[in-house]
Every structure is written in C-alpha cells, then in structure tokens.
Amino acid sequence: MLVLTVVVVLPRFQRIQSLNDVVNRLVREHLQGIRPVHAYNAEAYEQKKFAAANQDITDNNMVATKTMAVINPGMTAISSGLTLAVYWIGAFLIAAAGASAKLTLYSEMVVFSNYAMQIIMAFMLLNMVFVMLPRAQVSVRRVQEVIGTTSSIVSGAGAMVDESQQGTVEFRDVSFSYPDDGARVLSHVSFKAKQGETIAFIGATGSGKTTLVQLVDRLFDATGGEVLIDGVPIQDFDLDDLHNRVGYIPQTATLFKGTVKTNICYGEAAATRSDQEVEDALAIAQADFVQTLPAGTDATIEQGGRNVSGGQRQRLAIARALARKPEILVFDDSFSALDFATDRALRDALERECAGTTRLIVAQRVSTIRDADQILVLDQGRVVGQGTHEELLKSCKPYQEIVNSQMSAEEAAHV
Ligand code: ADP
C-alpha cells in the first residue's frame, strides 16, 4: 500500500499543487484583464485556456483520488482482518487451553491485539503524511524562494556630500544588463547634470531610457561603470537617504486607496507636510482638477487610482514626488499622458518653482524636451547623440529623424 502511495499518489499531489498555481494565475489574469477580454471578444479563448488547465488538474486529482479510494479501504481491511485474525486464533488457543491458563491467554490476546492496532495505525498515519508531504514540499519551496532571495541592492554606509556637488547626477561609462538576461541594455553611457539642469532622454521604444533612469534611484545597480549623485558613488548612500534625494516618477503612476492628500503625503516625513505644501505640489503638477472635486484634497481615491483618469493619475504622482522636495526629479515618460497645453504649463511651472532641482526627463515628444540643457538620443542602449536641441538638429541624424517624424521644419525651429 505504501509503495502504491509513493509511486502513484505522491508525484500526482506534487503536480496538483503546481497546477493550482496555473489555475490561480489564469483566473487572476482573466479578472484583471476583464476589459480587454471583452473588448477583443476573447471570452471563448480564455475559457478554453481555463478549461485545459482545469482538465489537467482534474485528471491528476482523479488518478490520485481513485488510488486513494483503493488504498484507504485496503488499509481498513488489513487492520480489521488483523483484529479478526488475532481474536480468531486467540479464541482457538483459549478453547484448547486448560482452565487456569484461559485468563492469562485472554489478557495476552487483548494486549497483542492493541499492539497490532497501534502498528497498523502508524502505517495509516504514514500514508497520510505521504499524501500531505508533496503538497507541503511544493509550498515550502515557493515560500523559501521568496524568503531566501536576498536583495543585491544593499544600503551603503552613508555618504558625506560636498555642498558644491549637490544636485549633480553623473554617469561614467555606464553599462547595464538585466540579471536574468545577458544582453546589454545600456552601453557606455556618460553624461553629467549640474544642479538645476534638465537632461532629457529620447529614443525609440526599447532603447533603454527607462532602464537608464531607474539606475538613478538604484532600482538596479549598473553592471559596468559608475553612477554618482552629488559627486558620490550611488552605492555609498544609505538607501533611505538616496530615496529622499531622488524623486522618481515611474512610467505607470500608482495610486493607493485613500484620499488625494494621503497619496500626496506618502512615505517618510509625510505627516509633517502642511496643507499649503500639498496645495503647492498640486499646483506645480497642474492637478487643478482637485479643486473642482467637492471634497478637494480629501476626495477619495480608489485602489490603484481607478476613479481618476490616466492623465490625472500621472499629475497626482508628479505632485507626490514634488511634495518631498527632492534634489533630483526623474520623470519616466510622465509627460506623454498629458495634453500639449498641460505638458507646456507643467514644464513652465517646474522651471519657475523648481529651478534648483535637477531634472531627468524621459520623453516621447520632442516639444517636451526641446528646452533641455542636454538631450541624449538613445538607440539600442547606446548614446547616438548628445547636446542641445539646436546642436542635435545640426549634427545628429537619428534626432533629425525623430524631429521630422513629429513636426514640420518650421515647427522644429520655433516650438
Ligand atoms: P525604453 O524605456 O526606451 O522603452 P526600456 O529601458 O524599458 O526601454 O527597455 C530596454 C530593453 O530592456 C528592452 O529591450 C527591454 O526588453 C529590456 N527590459 C526592460 N525591462 C526588463 C526586465 N525587467 N528584464 C529584462 N529585460 C528588460
């Protein structure tokens, strides 16, 4: 019986636990993507995917359960048969014994029967452990994967910053590959931004812009070269200190359930932020729509910011970064969800109110970055052009192509 459990049931239960993952993932994906599923009439396709996974898990469950349906009565039959055999043989022995030995034989029979039952019970429990063990093994392995993963981003001992270098961002011959992927995403990128300067990054999708700016907030460490903030290698900073210096606005704005205010006053030191500071941050971020809400900054924000538009979400995310008053602001394509007029107004407000803050801007539109102090044109992780808009217009072919694809020559000169 135990052999049957180990050979047939054990691997099945292991597989069932992994298949549970697949079914859960499919259900989650379907529910999260319910809108595209409807929009693309993909209900039948999704149902087919679910049915295949469901069939797989059902088949495995059937084999395991059918085997257990034989094993369990088998074990019970063995234990009951053994008890019957003990009493049967005992009864013959007692009947054949003399009167004085009958009582001794009877008590020995009862004791023997109890021991035999204990051994059988132990085997039945062992059988149950064999059923539960593979499921537990799979779960433990998964929990260990999470708990046992150590972050390669280790906080530095703390950096002594030279005042004269404050607000500077420097990349020295930086290269980068993602951990699970050998391909180089950035190759030999070098630039220096002084305090208050605006550095912009433009290039085709997949050219490495997001990857580059993520290195500034140490979401990843460069695999070659050096990134310096305030003149100090980025690895030397205490991570909290670094995150206070850099205001990173990711490509996809994430809002949390709460109010406008709890979203703006988010993170460390948020409690000390005054209402005026919140209002100022919202004003610079062009989040005027908050004023039109009946509850103003106390207006409710649903989970993930579902009750505000993409552009509004982006503006609130910008306001959240501004409220922290960082030395360096990193906008990862934060402007493309904004209309042209708001894009312009936001850049003007940043120029006016955050003149001392260094700005790194990833953008799709040339008009967004035209006034930048330095523009880096990226192509497959390499810098193929570096300079001001006017310089690049004269000397950089890839930049000229981007400009030409977006506006007429006259516009290019005057935007
Ligand atoms: P961009 O912002 O210019 O569109 P990205 O920096 O997002 O470009 O991506 C640059 C390259 O890195 C792409 O080829 C992309 O496939 C790859 N990449 C991005 N994120 C990851 C990741 N987490 N793991 C592996 N490769 C990635």
Image (cartoon, grey):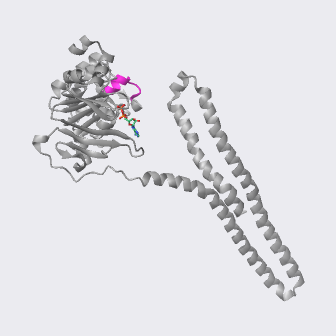
155 horizontally vs 89: left or right: left
Q: Quadrant of residue 166?
A: top left
Q: Residue furthest right?
A: 96
In magenta, the rendered stretch is: 305-314
Q: Residue furthest left?
A: 164
Please say whether residue 268 is visible from this viewpoint. no
Residue depicted at x 83% and y 87%: 101
**Quadrant in which the N terminus is drawn:** bottom right
Question: Front-most of 372 and 34?
Answer: 372
Give percent across and percent down for residue 244: 23, 41
292 lies above or below 90: above
Question: Front-most of 121 and 242?
Answer: 242
Give percent across and percent down for residue 286: 26, 22
Query: Is residue 318 a member of the stretch shown in magenta?
Result: no
Question: Front-most of 401 and 304?
Answer: 401
108 horizontally vs 177: left or right: right
157 lies above or below 334: below
**Quadrant in which the C terminus is drawn:** top left
313 lies above or below 156: above
Give percent across and percent down for residue 367: 26, 19
Q: How many numbered marks have been drawn onto this rendered protein structure?
A: 0
Give percent across and percent down for residue 129: 62, 61
Image quadrant of ligand 1 equals: top left
Residue depicted at x 59% and y 31%: 46
373 horizontally vs 107: left or right: left
Please say whether residue 191 is visible from this viewpoint. yes
Residue depicted at x 30% and y 51%: 154
Residue depicted at x 18% and y 46%: 232
Q: Quadrant of residue 206?
A: top left
Q: Quadrant of residue 68?
A: bottom right
Please, what is the dominant secondary structure of the magenta stretch?
helix
